[in-house]
């Protein structure tokens, strides 16, 4: 019996064909083989649109080697493509448009601003969302700083902490500004007057680069480093949403974000949350509430944007135990759990998309099997079939 095939769709990072998550794909291929699922990796650049063939990458676990060969389209596609400002992202748009009718484990999620507006429409989530506005002009930022002592400016399509600014109003009235540029480099902190804000922000060209202003949550530890929590919510082998795990992230010295790519490190949620709240009972309540929130958000976003298989929620917890959703990531990395020493969570994070793929494949097979008799009956002369 032929095994189902899962194609992992990604993007090359450069002209040399560098793949960002090659080690993860190796683990997924090995795990897929044990589950009865064949896995290969490809990019839009590897597709022959005329013959509907893919020059795909195959990993061989026994020899630990990669090779390429032409193959047919897979039964399912697992989209791991992250936003790039290159022609490769345009190739991705063409692929999605041409082959959008195929079975994807996950559809596109919209940008930070659109997701925020979608979540704002449901009363269940309003208390978890920091005040957020689209930056049409510098006046929006000025008003936000007047209203909130801490404000973050974020590009609506940014990832990994790129291009984020943190503006904090000091007691003497000056504004303390920190941030990262588009290459994730930490920019030199400055104190400026409110009157000087407009000229400081001019080079960032907030309107053209499409930014949002977001109410900041005070999440600095005693060390002065910021921290937050990365929650991974995935579909399981029965097609149901479930929290795979949640880990704490602590930013690098001088960083305004906790991203691991920006030099941050990970800890278990329990350890970090207990240290932050200093109340184990409260920490357990917060953890349970956060997990319920994560599953509810995932289900609601899927309802609005189409099939999804996993999401990462970046959460801030304030000193009182209040939970704040900072942003939603549709293409989450898993390394935070490995770094936090949570080997079993990391293993689950690798395997769950594969288990979900098999479940989805079997669901489609069962659906086809049910439809087949009806189609045969319809074609018989003089026979009327009532599908009920």
Image: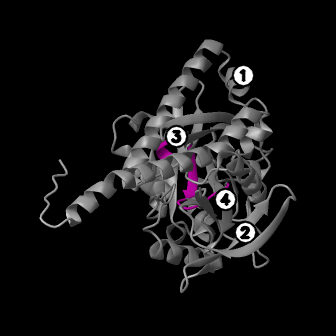
Residue at 86% x, 58% y: name it.
64
- The residue nearer to you, when weighing 76 against 325, is 76
Q: Are marks 4 and 3 in contact (CB under 8 Å)?
A: no
Q: Are marks 1 and 4 in contact (CB under 8 Å)?
A: no
- The residue nearer to you, when weighing 21 against 120, is 21
Q: Which mark is residue 39?
A: 4
- The residue nearer to you, when weighing 176 against 128, is 128
Spot occupied by residue 352 in the image (x, y as percentages of width and height): 61, 43
Q: Earlier in the sequence, mark 2 or mark 4?
A: 4
Graded by Cα atoms within 10 Å as few (under 14), some (14 to 19) or many (20 or more), the crowding at tag 2 reads many
Up-down: is 56 above or below 242? below
Residue 361 among those drawn in magenta:
no
Give the farthest residue toward the front.
Answer: 381
Spot occupied by residue 192 in the image (x, y as percentages of width and height): 66, 54
Dot in front, 3 or 2: 2
Question: Can the viewer see residue 256?
Answer: no
Residue at which label 2 appears: 57
Mark 1 residue element: helix
Graded by Cα atoms within 10 Å as few (under 14), some (14 to 19) or many (20 or more), the crowding at tag 1 reads few
Dot in front, 2 or 1: 2
Q: Which mark is residue 140?
A: none
Residue at which label 1 appears: 275
Residue at which label 3 appears: 325
Residue at 74% x, 45% y: name it.
335
């Amino acid at each position: 019996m032929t095994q189902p095939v899962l194609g992992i769709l990604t993007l090359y990072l450069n002209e040399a064909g560098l793949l960002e998550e090659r080690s993860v794909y190796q683990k997924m291929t090995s795990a897929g083989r044990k589950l009865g699922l064949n896995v290969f990796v490809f990019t839009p650049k590897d597709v022959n649109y005329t013959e509907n063939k893919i020059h795909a990458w195959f990993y061989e676990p026994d020899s630990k080697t990669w090779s390429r060969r032409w193959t047919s389209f897979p039964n399912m596609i697992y989209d791991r493509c992250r936003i790039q400002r290159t022609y490769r992202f345009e190739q991705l748009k063409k692929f999605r448009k041409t082959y959008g009718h195929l079975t994807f484990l996950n559809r596109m999620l919209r940008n930070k601003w659109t997701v925020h507006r979608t979540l704002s429409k449901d009363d269940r989530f309003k208390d978890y969302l920091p005040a957020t506005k689209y930056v049409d002009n510098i006046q929006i930022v000025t008003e936000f700083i007047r209203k909130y002592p801490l404000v973050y400016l974020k590009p609506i399509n940014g990832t990994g902490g790129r291009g984020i600014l943190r503006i904090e109003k000091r007691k003497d009235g000056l504004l303390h500004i920190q941030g990262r540029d588009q290459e994730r480099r930490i920019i030199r902190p400055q104190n400026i007057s409110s009157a000087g804000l407009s000229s400081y922000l001019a080079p960032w060209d907030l309107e053209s680069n499409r930014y949002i202003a977001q109410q900041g949550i005070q999440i600095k530890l005693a060390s002065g480093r910021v921290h937050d929590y990365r929650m991974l919510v995935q579909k399981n082998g029965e097609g149901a949403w479930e929290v795979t795990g949640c880990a704490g992230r602590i930013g690098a010295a001088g960083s305004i974000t906790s991203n691991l790519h920006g030099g941050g490190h990970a800890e278990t949620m329990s350890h970090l949350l207990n240290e932050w709240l200093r109340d184990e009972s409260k920490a357990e309540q917060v953890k349970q509430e956060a997990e319920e929130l994560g599953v509810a958000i995932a289900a609601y976003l899927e309802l609005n944007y189409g099939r999804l298989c996993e999401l990462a929620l970046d959460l801030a917890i304030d000193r009182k135990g209040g939970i704040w959703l900072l942003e939603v990531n549709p293409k989450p990395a898993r390394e935070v759990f490995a770094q936090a020493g949570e080997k079993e969570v990391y293993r689950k994070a690798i395997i769950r998309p594969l288990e979900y793929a098999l479940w989805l494949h079997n669901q489609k097979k069962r659906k086809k099997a049910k439809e087949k008799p009806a189609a045969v009956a319809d074609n018989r002369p003089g026979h009327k079939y009532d599908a009920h």
